[in-house]
């Protein structure tokens, strides 16, 4: 079984925010460490840095849904907590990190499996790229025209012009 962290108990609250990075220079590493150490005692969370190399970078862009093959890293801030009273602080902690690594972002969307529930539709579209997103919209129109399967990172069905 693959997993990022230890098994988490049911009912925990989560907010994850991630970006693909072109590079991970010393400044970004220092920023990541300082952000992690800045957590207040009642907050919990972690920062996941994943390098992309090998087959993940060799697969032709048109052969996969994931549209970013040139990135070097994925950086994700994971807030995980149990007390609803900490919602605002936990979410702010993850968002602050995500915003702070902006100098090293790529223009495309991040890894959608790790993205937050409030991810903007443009970023979802960017994660797939224009051509793949349009193709997914056609599939969605054929198999889910009423958009019932919309609770993950949603691809809207294509719109037919009359």
Image (cartoon, rainbow, N blue to C red):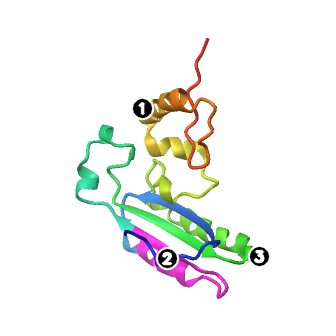
- Where residue 2 appears, as percent x and y from the top left, is 37, 68
Residue designated by label 1: 131
Nearer the observer, 68 or 147? 147
- Numbered circle sitting on residue 154: none
Nearer the observer, 66 or 33? 66
Residue drawn where x is 26% and y is 42% of the image: 60
- Where residue 73 appears, as percent x and y from the top left, is 37, 62
Would residue 36 be counted in the magenta stretch?
yes
Disc 3 element: helix
The tag earlier along the polypeptide, 1 or 2, is 2
The tag earlier along the polypeptide, 3 or 1, is 3
- Where residue 4 appears, as percent x and y from the top left, is 43, 71
Q: Quadrant of residue 128?
A: top left
Question: Going by the picture, which residue comes out furthest to the top?
Answer: 162
Query: What is the spatial separation of the Cα atoms under label 2 and label 3, in whole angstroms?
Result: 23 Å
Residue drawn where x is 59% and y is 72% of the image: 79
Residue designated by label 2: 7
Bounds of the magenta segment:
27-49
The tag earlier along the polypeptide, 2 or 3, is 2
From the viewer's perspective, is residue 23 above or below residue 85? above
Disc 2 element: loop
Residue drawn where x is 37% and y is 69% of the image: 1
Q: Quadrant of residue 26?
A: bottom left
Q: Is residue 126 visible?
A: yes
From the viewer's perspective, is residue 53 above or below residue 80? above
Q: Quadrant of residue 24?
A: bottom left
Which one is closest to the eye, mark 1 or mark 2? 2
Query: What is the spatial separation of the Cα atoms under label 1 and label 2, in whole angstroms?
Result: 37 Å
Residue designated by label 3: 85
Mark 2 closeness class: few <14, some 14–19, many ≥20 residues within 10 Å: few
Disc 1 element: helix
């Amino acid at each position: 079984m693959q997993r990022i962290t230890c098994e988490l108990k049911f009912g925990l609250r989560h907010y994850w925010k991630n970006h693909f990075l072109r590079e991970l220079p010393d400044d970004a590493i220092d920023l990541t460490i300082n952000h992690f150490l800045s957590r207040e005692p009642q907050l919990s969370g972690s920062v996941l840095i994943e390098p992309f190399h090998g087959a993940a970078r060799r697969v032709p862009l048109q052969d996969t849904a994931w549209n970013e093959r040139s990135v070097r890293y994925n950086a994700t801030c994971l807030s995980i907590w149990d007390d609803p009273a900490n919602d605002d602080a936990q979410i702010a902690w993850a968002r602050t990190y995500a915003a702070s690594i902006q100098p090293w972002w790529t223009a495309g969307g991040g890894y959608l499996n790790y993205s937050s529930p409030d991810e903007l539709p443009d970023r979802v579209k960017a994660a797939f790229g224009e051509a793949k997103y349009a193709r997914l919209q056609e599939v969605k129109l054929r198999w889910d025209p009423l958009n019932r399967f919309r609770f993950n990172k949603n691809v809207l069905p294509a719109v037919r012009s009359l």
